[in-house]
Image (cartoon, helix red, strand yellow):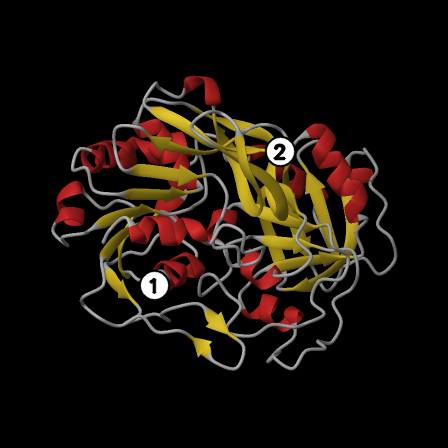
Amino acid sequence: MADAKPSHAPKPEGATGVLVLASGEVVWGRGFGAEGQAVGEVCFHTAMTGYQEIMTDPSFAGQIITFTFPHIGNVGANPDDIEAYAPHALGMIVREDVTAPSNFRAVENLDGWMRRHARIGLSGIDTRALTRRIRAGGAPNGVIAHSVAGEFDLDALLEMARAWPGLEGMDLAKSVSTETHYAWGQTREGGPWRLGFGYGGGEGDERPHVVAIDYGSKHNIFRNLVHAGAKVSVLPATATFDEVMALQPNGIFLSNGPGDPAATGEYAVPVIRQLLETNKPLFGICLGHQLLALAVGARTTKMFQGHRGANHPVKRVGADGATEQVEITSMNHGFAVERDSLPANARETHVSLFDGSNAGLELTDRPAFSVQYHPEASPGPQDSFYLFERFVGSLR
């Protein structure tokens, strides 16, 4: 990657896509998917599978994903492997050109799927070099652009990258949350998907009732709650305490989501504090974990490069401080809970073995716990499904 001024960056023959970083670095490639431009934070993801799930994860709102695995798109796209009904990531950067799909489940190729959802792709990139740049310098702001004619105003793209304020201080939960209350499984698919069977069911009013506050939730979270034995109602990120309690929940779930937890916490934390006072079981994931921590007086901070992948080792810590088990987890977060800020009634339960950052907590005086990672996987390993069973089991 040349560290040159965009107005003088040489464009290779045949280049139809470009990435312009706020630093002035220019990366040329071949565009696919939709034409246009998008500005956001450039990050990387290490999963080898599940690019559809990753692109549709609402936690990726405001971000451009660099895939470290070189062959992206080779299994095409289908209507089942999604975590929301439209992509939330702004675009993708990949090493190899997207080829025709080779998978019996594919109903369209990735290029067409990206174009249909107005998302920009950039191929032919040295993703290893870009990943090393992010690891060394942090996740930068940048603009991804695609023009079939290969015409770009690099100065304008650089100005756009530099003008974007970044994710710190940005509340994105409202923009990706549901706008209305709905019952999961009646208007959406119920339990987890299985080859040859499709989506599982979850009918029955006798099931314990979980009210989920949607800060940018993934579908597979709700599917796993149903599979564990719950029925699920979903409320918007801005739901009030009275709106939650009016549904008579047996337990409350705080979902994942994008953006700065401190910004979302401006309206979410007061509600969570009231919910904790009810002594109803509460379970949080990712952003929900960070919001629970904020609600009990802890702090969150922006990470240098974040954790995004499906191979993150996490150790489970017992009450005596001893390691109980190591889980391989799926992660997607750019903010973290500051361990030293946890109050006396919050016990650290999980720790990242990559960098030692906090990955879970439970309250000692309330039936509430949370994890920083994604136990629902999708994509990723299934080591942490037990957390859904633990939560739903506590509601009976």
Relative to 161, is 132 on the left or the right?
right
Q: Is residue 103 visible in the rendered structure shown here?
A: yes
Is residue 28 positioned above or below 196 on the image? above
Circle 2 sits on which residue? 353
The Cα–Cα distance between marks 2 and 1, rounded to whole angstroms, is 30 Å
Q: Position of residue 34 (x, y in %)?
A: 61, 64
Q: Give the number of the disc on residue 226.
A: 1
Which quadrant holds residue 262? top left
Relative to 21, is 239 on the left or the right?
left
Is residue 16 positioned above or below 355 on the image? below
Using a 10 Å C-alpha cutoff, classify the residue at mark 2 as few (fewer than 14 neighbours), some (14 to 19) or many (20 or more): some
Q: Nearer the viewer, residue 136 or 365?
A: 365
Using a 10 Å C-alpha cutoff, classify the residue at mark 1 as few (fewer than 14 neighbours), some (14 to 19) or many (20 or more): many
Q: Position of residue 272 (x, y in %)?
A: 25, 36
Relative to 207, is 305 on the left or the right?
right
Q: Give the number of the disc on residue 236.
A: none
Q: Secondary structure at mark 1?
A: helix
